[in-house]
């Protein structure tokens, strides 16, 4: 599968789960595990790196990521004005 489509699915999963702005690393890892079906730590790190490289997320602190405007624009029909799930 195209890596961009996989990243789209990961972001869609996070948005459906209630995230709109910031995501804790453990929740991002969970989303990757669900979408990709992987539990290998190296694969999870590679998908996080891919999400950063393709501009879907930005690292804010050691364990907190922020969804970028690009990621949010992909799923604009599902987005509300505020985050419904807290870290």
Image (cartoon, helix red, strand yellow):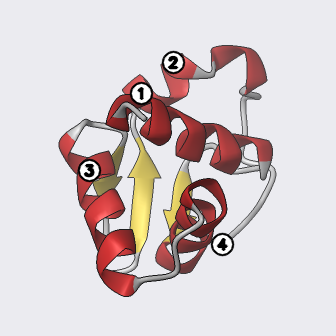
Answer with mark 4 or mark 1, whichever residue precedes in sequence.
1
- What residue did someone put label 3 on? 50
For the residues labelled 2 and 4, say whether their Cβ atoms are less than 8 Å apart: no
- Crowding near the residue tagged with mark 1, few <14, some 14–19, many ≥20 C-alpha atoms within 10 Å: few
For the residues labelled 4 and 1, say whether their Cβ atoms are less than 8 Å apart: no
Answer with mark 4 or mark 3, whichever residue precedes in sequence.
3
Horizontal side of residue 62 vs 8, given as left or right: left
Q: Position of residue 41 (x, y in %)?
A: 38, 85
Q: CA distance from mark 3 to mark 1?
A: 16 Å
- What residue did someone put label 4 on? 87
**31, 70: nearer the viewer:** 31
Mark toward the viewer: 3 or 1: 3
User: Of the numbered discs in the image, which one, if any, rests on residue 73?
Assistant: 2
For the residues labelled 1 and 2, say whether their Cβ atoms are less than 8 Å apart: yes
Answer with mark 2 or mark 4, whichever residue precedes in sequence.
2
Helix, strand or loop at mark 2:
helix
Q: CA distance from mark 4 to mark 3?
A: 22 Å
**Image vertical order of residue 75 relative to residue 19, above or below:** above
Q: CA distance from mark 2 to mark 4?
A: 22 Å
- Crowding near the residue tagged with mark 2, few <14, some 14–19, many ≥20 C-alpha atoms within 10 Å: few
Query: Residue at coordinates 51% horizontally, 18% vertically from top-left?
Result: 73
Answer with mark 3 or mark 1, whichever residue precedes in sequence.
3
- What residue did someone put label 1 on? 69
Q: Residue furthest left?
A: 53
């Amino acid at each position: 599968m195209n890596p961009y489509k996989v990243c789209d699915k990961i972001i869609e999963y996070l948005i459906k789960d209630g995230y709109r702005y910031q995501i804790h690393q453990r929740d991002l890892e969970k989303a990757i595990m669900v979408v990709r079906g992987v539990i290998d730590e190296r694969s999870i790190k590679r998908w996080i790196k891919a999400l950063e490289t393709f501009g879907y997320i930005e690292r804010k602190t050691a364990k907190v990521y922020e969804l970028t405007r690009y990621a949010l624009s992909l799923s604009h029909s599902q987005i509300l004005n505020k985050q419904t799930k807290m870290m």
